[in-house]
Image: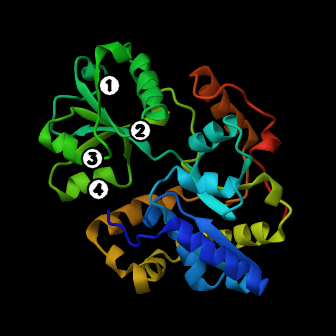
Amino acid sequence: MKHLFRYSLAAALGLLLSTNVACGADKLTVLLDWFINPDHAPLFVAQERGYFRDRGLEVEFIAPSNPNDPPKLVAAGKADLAVSYQHQHQMQVDQGLPLVRVATLIATPLNSLVVLADGDIKKIGDLQGKTIGYSVGGFETVLLKVMLEREGLTLDEVRLINVNFSLSPSLFTGAADAVIGAFRNFELNQMDIENRPGRAFYVEEFGIPAYDELIMVAGRDSLANPAIGKFIDGLEAGVQYLVNHPEESWKLFISGERSDLDDELNRRAWRDTLPRFALRPRALDRTRYLRFAEFLKEQGIIKEIPPLDRWAVELEN
C-alpha cells in the first residue's frame, strides 16, 4: 500500500480550523486512522457523490503519520471526528480521553494470524516453538495469547519478535513463521500477488468476541452538534451507493488525487472489504460492545468499564 498524501497534520489542522471560524460554515475536519486505502471507501464515495454537501457540510479528510494521534486530537478539540479502532477507543477512554463512538465503518474484525499457505503450520497447535511477528504490542499480544490458549498452548511456548509492520516480508524472508495483526483484506492479497499465498486464522474463530474494526469517534462535548448526525447520514448514503454500485464507486474512489491507488492490491482489497462495511453506521449493538469491553477487562487491557453511554452512542436522526 502506498501513502497518498503526506500532511503536516498540525499545519493542516490549524489552517482548517481558522477557515472554519472565519466562514462560520458547517465544516467538519475528519482525521483518518492511516493513509487512504479501501477501508475508507464509504467516506470518499459519500464525498464524491455529494452526500455531505447535500446536507450542508463541507468535510475535509486528513491522513495522519501516526495512527494513535487522531483520537487524541479530537479529544483535544483540534478536529471534529476521527477514524479509530474499537479496541483503541476503549483503551483511550480507559485512559480518560473524553471520546465517544458515534458510528461504525467496518463492522467485523480484520485482524488475523497469517502463515505461508505452503508452510508446515496447518493449525494453531503447530505454532509451538515457532517465531511469531507482531507490529503493535498489547492488543495483538492478547489476541495471540487467547488463540494459543484455545489450542492448549501458551505465549511461553512461542517466540515473539517485533517486525515493525513488515508483516508479509517477515514471512517471505523466514524471519517469522507467523504474524499476528495482519489484515485479512490486505496482507493475504499482498502475499497472493507476490505468488506466496497465505493462510489466515481469524481471531473471532478462536475465542475473541467479534468487534468493529473501524469506528468513528467524536468528542463527548460535541455530541449535540447537528453536523455530526448529518455526517453519519451522509456516510450511510455513501455505504448504500457503494454496495449497490461497486464498480462505479471504485472509479470515484480512484479519481483525481487518489489515482495512484489504482493498483492490483487496492482493487483486491476493495473487493474483500466491501461486504464488511457497516450498512447502518450509526446503529449500536450494546450487547456486543459490552461483551468486547468485558473481554478487554478480563485480559487486563482496560481497568474499568464506564457506563456505555459515556463512550458509545447511537445518535438520533
Query: How far is disc 2 from disc 3 in space, using C-alphas?
Result: 11 Å
> Mark 4 touching mark 1, by CB under 8 A?
no
The residue shown at (43%, 28%) is 141
On the image, the x and y values in percent for residue 122 come to 24, 29
Q: Secondary structure at mark 1?
A: helix
Crowding around mark 1 (Cα neighbors within 10 Å: few <14, some 14 to 19, many 20+) is some
The C terminus - image quarter: bottom right
Q: Earlier in the sequence, mark 2 or mark 3?
A: 2
Q: Earlier in the sequence, mark 4 or mark 1?
A: 1
Q: Earlier in the sequence, mark 2 or mark 1?
A: 1
Crowding around mark 4 (Cα neighbors within 10 Å: few <14, some 14 to 19, many 20+) is many
Q: Earlier in the sequence, mark 4 or mark 3?
A: 3
Q: Amino acid at mark 3?
A: Ser
> Mark 2 touching mark 1, by CB under 8 A?
no
Query: How far is disc 3 from disc 1 in space, using C-alphas?
Result: 21 Å
The residue shown at (82%, 55%) is 221
Q: Secondary structure at mark 3?
A: loop
In the rendered image, which residue does mark 1 sit on?
124
Q: Is residue 232 above or below residue 55?
A: above
Residue 81 in sight in this render? yes
The N terminus - image quarter: bottom left
On the image, the x and y values in percent for residue 44 come to 54, 75
Q: Which mark is residue 189?
A: 4
In the rendered image, which residue does mark 2 sit on?
136
In the rendered image, which residue does mark 3 sit on?
166
In the image, taking residue 82 as reference, residue 180 lies left or right, namely: left
Q: Amino acid at mark 2?
A: Val
